[in-house]
Amino acid sequence: MYVLWPAFLMSAVAVGFFFSMIDPHELTIVGLHLADSREAAYTVGFFVFWALFSACSGLTYLLSQSSPAQPPTLLQNPEDREHQDKALIGR
């Protein structure tokens, strides 16, 4: 739900934006037309955009769920840890 719905909504926006500027009948790759009808091109474009946005959203979700790394401790010796509060007070 955190991945597919945002990707679905953004793919609908992307298809509308993309195909408002480019006619599907003008799309050719290596001299081959990609789709016979405009509806087929819209459908294929929607699923391609959905797959791309799902991958982006899934990667964002995965990276946001990882636990943060522990900061390195500057006080390595047990004697340093014992006197850490006293060092700050005396200055």
Image: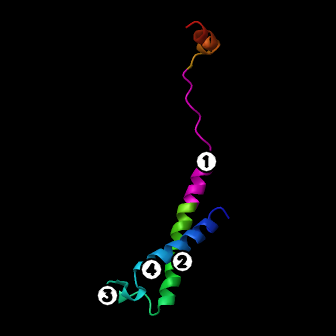
The quadrant of the rendering that contains the N terminus is: bottom right
Structural distance between the alpha carbons of marks 2 and 1: 29 Å
Task: Give the mark nearer the N terminus: 3 vs 2.
Answer: 3
Which numbered dot is residue 20?
A: 4
Quarter of the image with the C terminus is: top right
CA separation in Å, label 2 and label 4: 17 Å
The location of residue 39, given as percent across then percent down, is: 51, 89
Q: Nearer the viewer, mark 4 or mark 3?
A: 4
Q: Is residue 30 above or below residue 7?
A: below
Residue of label 1 = 66
The residue under label 3 is 31
Q: Earlier in the sequence, mark 2 or mark 4?
A: 4
Q: Which callout, 2 or 1, points at the residue further toward the start of the chain? A: 2
- The coloring applied to the image is rainbow
> Which type of secondary structure does the marked residue at label 3 adopt?
loop
Q: Earlier in the sequence, mark 1 or mark 4?
A: 4
Give the camera-side residue of 29 and 27. 27
Q: Quadrant of residue 34?
A: bottom left
Q: Which residues are magenta?
A: 58-74
User: Residue 47's mark?
Assistant: 2
Q: Regarding mark 4 in the picture, which secondary structure is present there? A: helix
